[in-house]
């Protein structure tokens, strides 16, 4: 272990170990299932253009997620402490690497995902209540630059309210947080199962099946993938082997975002019963369940809709279009309710887990002192509130939309400028930043087996060293493709990570004063 006393471990004494195997599995599954699986297949299908390649994208995501989860199991069993992945990176490399992860988690990974999921909740509530809209302004957009603006719409207000409500509920103790998580994760898992069963047995469409599976691997209706570097050629899935490879890599942004946050249970290890066994089991069970449901959901889309219907689903709501085949106009309302349940439960898990990382950082003198204290309900309330405030601020920025010529898009009726939200950008930033640290954490398996060969390892990574090595290679290839073909939205992720270096040394110098009082 590191030379200094493990203050995060000592601090865990104040936590209540109230999470069993079922609760932990619900945190894994519930944090993963948000709105992505209901939406991102539209963009994925525009990139890859065929039923076979759409399923392949999700299969690749499934293998990557399961490989990572099985590898994390060894680290979780070896170091079952509050902070999880932050602790693994700190022990394998140095406190700097742990801090860079926690810093990135706070700035964009956890809070950015919370913001994006909250926007998705409000977006689908707008299906039932049209006054909740991203153009129903309370404060009209104020342009900050050629790319971004800030505003306050009714949709944004609802997003912020959801973040605030769930943050408050989680300050009331672990028991209430886990009850919300268990109820909503069970409900949305059932919703996905019902969507799959309805699609397979009621909505299956002979014409869609013939179209999709008759030309299983033939791309059609694909979008060109334009690089941000002038010397790199434009490609598409129609370009042959290289084009298909690049399309599948770029498409991982959507599918990996949909499968993100499975590692959140490691953050709460200080509150898990028998964590050396429970955390690895919940990682395997939760990720296995969700990935299976995701693959079956996409198979359902292909049984009910032709690939063109998936590519052109209104507002990318593929699941809504699939239910529309079965229930007609009522399908939109049914799906909106299901996604609201899903996103509510997803954000509860994200909010619950994230503050535990800031708690561990504080006990190393690397974050605000107050985030290292537990309230009378034995939860890090200050960390929860700070996380909620920053996530709410991330809801406010808007993107200024442009057409193919670079001109700003305007409403054809009113002539007013149209705005997007930061959802897609946050998605790209989050995925790239997350992949960096996933690869580093998997590499920590090799480092720690060398540095700490005698450490207790109740569970050893399945397929070591081949499976972890394959994961690192695959993720590295995806990141290289994203750097070339999604430069404008991936380089900010790298900048955010690097921005933590000077902050680390500032905190290292001045933050240590609070450690003694927290130990």
Image (cartoon, grey):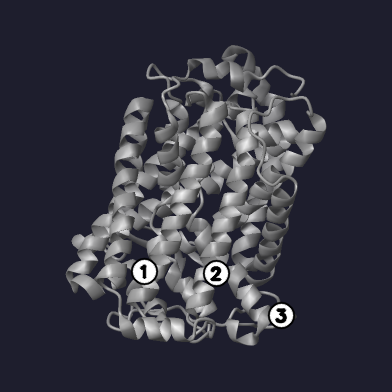
Which one is in front in this view, the residue at disc 3 or the one at disc 2?
2
Q: Which residue is mark 3?
A: 230
Q: Is residue 46 left or right of residue 23?
A: right
Which one is in front in this view, the residue at disc 1 or the one at disc 3?
1
Residue 369 percent coordinates (x, y): 56, 23
Q: Is residue 21 left or right of residue 465?
A: left
- Answer with the quarter of the image where residue 91 lies: top right
Residue 216 percent coordinates (x, y): 50, 81
Q: Which residue is mark 1?
A: 300
Tell me which numbered mark, 3 or 2, is placed earlier along the sequence.
2
Q: Is residue 316 left or right of residue 241?
A: left
Could you give the CA–CA distance between mark 2 and mark 1, rounded to whole angstroms? 15 Å
Quadrant of the drawing holding the C terminus:
top right
Residue 259 percent coordinates (x, y): 49, 54
Decide: is 203 above or below 260: below
Residue 101 percent coordinates (x, y): 63, 41
Count of marks overlaid on the render: 3
Could you give the CA–CA distance between mark 1 and mark 3, rounded to whole angstroms? 39 Å
Tell me which numbered mark, 2 or 1, is placed earlier along the sequence.
2
Tell me which numbered mark, 1 or 3, is placed earlier along the sequence.
3
Quadrant of the drawing holding the N terminus:
top right
- Answer with the quarter of the image where residue 127 lies: bottom left
* Disc 1 element: helix
* Disc 3 element: loop
Q: Which residue is mark 2?
A: 56
* Residue at screen point 40% across, 83% down: 308
* Of the pair 320 and 112, the residue shown nearer to us: 320
Q: CB atoms at circles 3 and 2 under 8 Å apart?
A: no
């Amino acid at each position: 272990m590191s030379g200094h006393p493990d203050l995060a471990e000592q601090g865990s004494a104040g936590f209540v170990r109230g999470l069993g195997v079922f609760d932990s599995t619900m945190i894994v599954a519930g944090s993963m299932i948000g709105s992505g699986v209901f939406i991102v297949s539209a963009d994925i299908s525009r990139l890859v253009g065929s039923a076979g390649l759409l399923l392949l994208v999700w299969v690749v995501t499934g293998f990557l997620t399961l490989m990572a989860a099985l590898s994390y199991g060894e680290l979780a069993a070896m170091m079952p402490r509050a902070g999880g992945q932050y602790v693994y990176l700190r022990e394998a490399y140095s406190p700097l690497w742990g801090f860079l992860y926690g810093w990135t988690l706070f700035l964009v990974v956890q809070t950015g995902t919370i913001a994006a999921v909250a926007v998705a909740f409000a977006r689908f509530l707008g299906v039932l209540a049209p006054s909740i809209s991203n153009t129903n302004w309370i404060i009209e957009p104020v342009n900050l630059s050629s790319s971004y603006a800030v505003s306050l719409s009714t949709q944004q207000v609802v997003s912020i309210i959801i973040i605030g409500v769930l943050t408050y509920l989680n300050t009331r103790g672990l028991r209430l947080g886990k009850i919300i998580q268990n109820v909503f994760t069970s409900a949305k898992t059932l919703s996905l199962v019902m969507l799959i069963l309805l699609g397979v047995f009621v909505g299956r469409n002979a014409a869609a099946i013939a179209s999709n599976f008759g030309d299983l691997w033939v791309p059609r209706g694909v979008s060109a993938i334009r690089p941000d570097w002038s010397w790199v050629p434009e490609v598409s899935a129609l370009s042959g082997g290289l084009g298909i490879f690049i399309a599948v890599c770029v498409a991982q942004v959507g599918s990996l975002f949909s499968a993100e946050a499975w590692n959140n249970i490691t953050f709460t290890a200080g509150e898990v019963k028998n964590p050396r066994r429970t955390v690895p089991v919940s990682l395997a069970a939760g990720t296995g369940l969700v990935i299976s449901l995701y693959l079956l959901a996409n198979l359902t889309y292909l049984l009910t809709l032709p690939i063109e219907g998936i590519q052109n689903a209104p507002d990318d709501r593929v699941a809504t279009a699939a239910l529309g085949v079965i229930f007609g106009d009522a399908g939109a309302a049914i799906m909106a309710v299901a996604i609201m349940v899903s996103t509510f439960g997803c954000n509860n898990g994200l909010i619950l887990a994230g503050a535990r990382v800031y708690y561990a950082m504080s006990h190393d003198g690397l974050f605000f002192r107050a985030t290292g204290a537990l309230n009378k309900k034995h939860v890090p309330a200050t960390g929860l509130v700070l996380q909620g405030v920053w996530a709410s601020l991330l809801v406010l920025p808007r993107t200024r939309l442009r057409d193919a010529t670079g001109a700003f898009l305007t409403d054809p009726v009113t002539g007013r400028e149209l705005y997007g939200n930061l959802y897609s950008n946050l998605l790209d930033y989050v995925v790239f930043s997350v992949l960096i640290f996933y690869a580093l954490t998997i590499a920590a398996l090799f480092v720690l087996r060398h540095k700490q060969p005698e450490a207790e390892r109740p569970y050893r990574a399945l397929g070591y060293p081949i499976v972890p090595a394959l994961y690192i290679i695959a993720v590295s290839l995806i990141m290289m493709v994203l750097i070339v073909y999604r430069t404008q939205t991936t380089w900010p992720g790298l900048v955010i990570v690097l921005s933590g270096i000077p902050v680390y040394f500032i905190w290292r110098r001045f933050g240590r004063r609070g450690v003694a009082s927290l130990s």
